[in-house]
Amino acid sequence: MAVEKRDRDRRPTPRRKPAPAPAQPREGATIRLRDVATADLPEIIDLDRRLTGEAKPAYWKAGVAPQPDRFFLVAESANGGFAGFAIGEIRAWEFGSPPVGWIFAIQVDPDLRQAGVGTALFDGLCARFRTAGIGLVRTMVNRRDHLILSFFRTQGLTAGPSLELEMELEP
């Protein structure tokens, strides 16, 4: 949906604080980020199944395929074990928006939460967006998902100018 011409000059410019400097992991914690590999697929599918209660192998198989302007990162713990993953993408001109970085998913092994894995993944995506010349990051969360909402607020995200609308379709 395009922004109505009459509304373009009336929209307030959002005042946002710049993203904070990357947080340091807990003392003794080492988190390594890298691009996803096909060999990560079983661990991605398993982590997603454990967190969501549903296995989606076809979805994730398609998701690991390289795509322009998409960043799919994997986090590894100090011992090289799979710790989590994040997906972000540069999207442009939707709803009148200039190019921005969208974070689609951040999932962290529950046994490794509070160890800086999610923050490292978030910072890794933001670094990729900055390198691509992007100065704004967005995501969408379920307002009842307090865990992920708190995480993103801790990273410095605030409510943006858009409002999601939806409608159920009858069969």
Image (cartoon, rainbow, N blue to C red):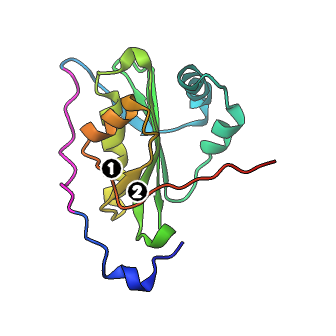
Looking at the image, residue 9 lies above or below residue 11: below
Give the residue type that dot 1 points to.
Answer: Cys
- The answer to whether the residues at label 1 and label 2 have Cβ atoms under 8 Å apart is yes
The N terminus: image quadrant: bottom right
Q: Mark on residue 126? A: 1
- Decide which of 158, 75 is in the foreground and name it: 158
Please tell me which residue is depicted at 42% across the width and 18% down the height of the picture. 110
Total numbered badges shown on the rendered structure? 2
Q: Residue furthest right?
A: 171
Q: Which residues are magenta?
A: 15-26
User: Residue 142 appears at what percent x and percent y?
Assistant: 46, 39
- Decide which of 148, 136 is in the foreground and name it: 148
Q: Which residue is mark 2?
A: 101
Please tell me which residue is depicted at 20% across the width and 62% down the height of the picture. 15
Q: Is residue 7 magenta?
A: no
Name the magenta segment's main secondary structure.
Answer: loop
Q: CA distance from mark 1 to mark 2?
A: 8 Å
Secondary structure of the residue carrying tag 1 is helix
Mark 1 and mark 2 lie on one chain; the one further toward the N terminus is: 2
**Quadrant of the rendered structure where residue 9 is?**
bottom left
Looking at the image, residue 37 lies above or below residue 69: above
Please tell me which residue is depicted at 41% across the width and 21% down the height of the picture. 80
How many C-alpha atoms fall within 10 Å of the one at disc 2: few (<14), some, or many (≥20)? many
Q: Residue furthest bottom?
A: 5
User: Residue 143 appears at what percent x and percent y?
Assistant: 42, 39
